[in-house]
């Protein structure tokens, strides 16, 4: 214990550049015999100013991990062959994505396919002869002249409402389709066709069918929640529609006997922005027995709603079946936790397999499903590889197999994080986390920063947030909370702000500020507020309603709902959240737009926005900056070239660091 104390004394506060030391597990796959785990680890390279990810394999029998791939590339999804002798994985190299094959024991990799495009949902056929996946070609793939590929087109003719996507840019002409690849010959065969995306392919255990999801509504861009489930013969042939209720469908998975398909979804195609729960459903291969919700009394989503700044986005609802077909596994977020569960295949009450104040970022079961492999994160660690028994109480016998971020425990002095439940104006309990500065002194009075999450239908969670620790290390008490309108507390909680952003959510944020002010170590005259995306919207809303914050930083935000409707890559979907269109419900859009109240602003505000943000377009920041300037308010703007919406999570490394430094610099100036 004395040695530990001496080491602790030499620890230093976390810095922005510690981002380069983080090692983030991004995917994992358990071998069929449950003795090895293939996983990928992403890191930021300071010299190259890029992200790289490599393949590792952990042998559970030997208790050791080996790195299998090296170099300046980005390895992605992994999948074990049915006999456990090979590992297929995707990798992006030289601006092309490919599928590679690696012997299970390591050695020379074999390139099976390389394209300019996107590949996802990689899986094997049961006989180990084929790989099935989703592929969409980029437009450049069909241009042979390398010089021509670099040139911008003469024009873009747009006919589709959904023609661009944040982080991707203009969508290619090709659609996602299901393909199969013969391992021996390298022959590629397209299993689906048409001008609609076909996604989430999965192969039946008997090797006869591939199930996938496609929206065939006559206006799929507007009716984006009307998915259908299809199956097509693995050998090729005509597709068949599997009857399901209208609604979204994600992550279909065949039962071990190939007679049923489980999926994550719901039956409310007119849902607002994520207000309806997405439970686990099951349907017979040919629609009999008919589709039904297996967990109607469970008021949570069957997927990960937790957010962090160490990964791009939270996972889709991956499902896994036990070998006997009696259980279906899934992750679910509940009041800041994301834990692993199973539901009886006949339906019933979910059972928690791994319970804890943690963030199960991904999982995989295979073979006899005795073990669950996990990517585990918590408040002090962004991610490690773990296993646990795939049964109730698994967390009690869990084993951690990696120590990827040891420096956070041995070299860095993190701020202590308190989890808190406080009461809002109407007595409703709201959840939050308070990060105290390292070497916290309760007799001091600290400046504070209230952080507001994006979404809005996500949750802050028991997961590592570098930004919160960085600001705490700079001497601020950081408070981040889950106001009404987010996920993790059920449908009523999520829908509480539908049609009326800035009401209950604003009051919950003010209750958080009230709670902060009451702490004797908080300087109530030096409180700041910040948030990104919807959190930026709320920051904008707050400074137009109150002057209690002495500084604000609004990031990738929305100020005008009317222009957001047309300028965002998905803005038209706001019609469900705000009860109509800007032209037939003008009052509601104006009432809910922060820019309507900017004549009241007295708070010094820094605007941070990315120039290639297609989710909340740069015009939102420009409107805000010009209006506040003309009103002679204290305002500055920092623009990041080339970056999309997710700069804080996966932007170019030097820009991520610059963003953090600008946030802290502004608060240092005014707090």
Image: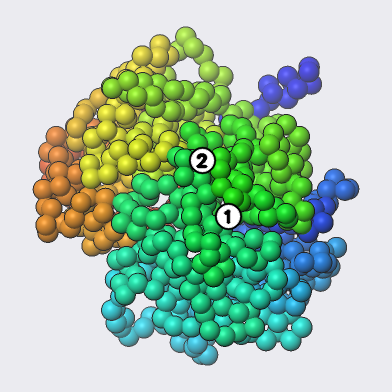
Residue 356 location, quadrant: top right
Residue shown at 36% from the left, 55% from the top:
268
Residue 223 location, quadrant: bottom left
Q: In this view, does 148 lie to the left or right of 92?
A: left
Residue shown at 68% from the left, 55% from the top:
325
- The image shows residue 456, relative to residue 30, as above or below, that is above
Residue shown at 41% from the left, 61% from the top:
245
- Horizontal and vertical percent position of residue 253: 60, 61
- Horizontal and vertical percent position of residue 264: 50, 55
- Horizontal and vertical percent position of residue 318: 58, 55
Determine the secondary structure under disc 2. strand
Residue 97 location, quadrant: bottom right
- State yes or no: discs 1 and 2 in contact (Cβ < 8 Å): no
Residue shown at 79% from the left, 21% from the top:
3
Quadrant for the N terminus in the image: top right
- The image shows residue 202, relative to residue 300, as above or below, that is below
Q: Label 2, on which residue?
A: 333
Q: Looking at the image, which is closer to me, 324 or 375?
A: 324
- The image shows residue 67, relative to residue 170, as above or below, that is above
Compare marks 1 and 2 and give the one earlier in the sequence.
1
Q: How crowded is mark 2: few (under 14 residues within 10 Å), some or many (20 or more)?
A: many
Q: Is residue 251 left or right of residue 364?
A: left
Determine the secondary structure under disc 1. loop
Q: Label 1, on which residue?
A: 318
Identify the residue at the far bottom of this view.
144
Q: Looking at the image, which is closer to me, 204 or 524?
A: 204
């Amino acid at each position: 214990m004395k040695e530990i104390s001496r080491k602790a004394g030499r620890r230093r506060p976390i810095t922005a550049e510690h981002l380069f030391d983080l090692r983030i597990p991004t995917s994992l796959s358990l071998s069929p015999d449950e003795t090895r785990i293939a996983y990928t680890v992403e890191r930021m390279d300071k010299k190259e100013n890029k992200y790289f990810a490599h393949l590792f394999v952990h042998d559970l029998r030997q208790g050791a991990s080996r790195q299998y791939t090296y170099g300046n590339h980005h390895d992605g999804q992994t999948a074990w062959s049915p006999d456990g002798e090979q590992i297929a994985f995707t990798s992006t190299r030289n601006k092309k994505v490919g599928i590679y094959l690696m012997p299970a024991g390591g050695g020379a990799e074999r390139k099976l396919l390389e394209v300019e495009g996107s590949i996802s949902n990689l899986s094997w056929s049961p006989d180990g002869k084929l790989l099935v996946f989703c592929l969409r070609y980029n437009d450049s793939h069909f241009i042979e002249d390398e010089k021509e590929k670099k040139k911008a087109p003469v024009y873009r003719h747009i006919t589709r409402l959904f023609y661009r996507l944040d982080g991707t840019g203009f969508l290619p002409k090709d659609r996602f389709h299901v393909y199969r690849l013969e391992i021996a010959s390298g022959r590629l065969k397209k299993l689906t066709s048409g001008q609609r995306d076909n996604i989430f392919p999965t192969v039946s255990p008997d090797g006869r069918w591939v199930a996938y999801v496609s929206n065939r509504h006559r206006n799929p861009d507007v009716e984006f929640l009307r998915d259908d489930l299809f199956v097509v013969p693995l050998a090729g042939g005509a597709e068949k529609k599997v009857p399901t209720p209208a609604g979204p469908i994600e992550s279909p998975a065949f039962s071990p006997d190939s007679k049923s398909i489980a999926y994550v979804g719901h039956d409310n195609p007119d849902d607002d922005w994520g207000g309806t729960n997405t439970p686990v459903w099951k349907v017979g291969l040919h629609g009999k027995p008919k589709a039904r919700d297996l967990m109607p009394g469970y008021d949570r989503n069957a997927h990960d709603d937790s957010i962090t700044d160490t990964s791009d986005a939270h996972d889709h609802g991956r499902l896994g079946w036990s070998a006997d077909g009696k259980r279906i596994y899934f992750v679910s977020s509940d009041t800041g936790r994301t834990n692993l569960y199973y539901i009886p295949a006949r339906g019933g009450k979910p059972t928690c397999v791994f319970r804890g104040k943690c963030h199960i970022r991904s999982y995989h079961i295979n073979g006899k499903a005795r073990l669950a492999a996990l990517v585990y994160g918590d408040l002090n660690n962004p991610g490690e590889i773990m296993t646990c028994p795939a049964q109730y109480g698994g967390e009690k016998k869990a084993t951690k197999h990696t120590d990827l971020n040891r420096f956070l425990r041995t070299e860095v002095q993190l701020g202590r994080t308190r989890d808190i439940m406080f009461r809002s104006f109407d007595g409703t309990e709201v959840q939050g986390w308070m990060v105290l500065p390292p070497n916290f002194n309760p007799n001091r009075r600290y400046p504070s920063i209230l952080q507001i999450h994006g979404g809005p239908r996500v949750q802050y969670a028991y997961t590592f947030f570098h930004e919160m620790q960085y600001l705490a290390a700079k001497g601020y008490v950081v408070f981040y909370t889950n106001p009404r309108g987010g996920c993790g507390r059920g449908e009523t909680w999520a829908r509480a702000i539908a049609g009326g952003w800035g009401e209950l959510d604003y009051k919950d944020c003010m209750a958080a500020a009230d709670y902060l002010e009451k702490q004797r170590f908080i300087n109530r005259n030096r409180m700041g507020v910040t948030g990104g995306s919807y959190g930026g919207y709320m920051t904008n809303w707050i400074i137009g309603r109150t002057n209690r914050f002495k500084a604000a930083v609004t990031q990738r935000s929305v100020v005008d709902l009317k222009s957001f409707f047309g300028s965002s890559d998905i803005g038209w979907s706001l019609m469900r959240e705000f009860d109509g269109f800007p032209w037939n419900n003008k009052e509601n859009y104006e009432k809910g737009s922060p820019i309507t109240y900017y004549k009241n602003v007295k708070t010094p505000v820094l605007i941070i926005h990315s120039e290639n943000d297609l989710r909340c377009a740069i015009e939102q920041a420009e409107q805000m900056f010009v209006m506040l300037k003309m009103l002679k308010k204290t305002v500055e703007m920092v623009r990041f070239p080339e970056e999309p919406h997710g700069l804080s999570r996966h932007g170019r490394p030097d820009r991520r660091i610059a963003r953090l430094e600008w946030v802290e610099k502004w608060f240092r100036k005014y707090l």
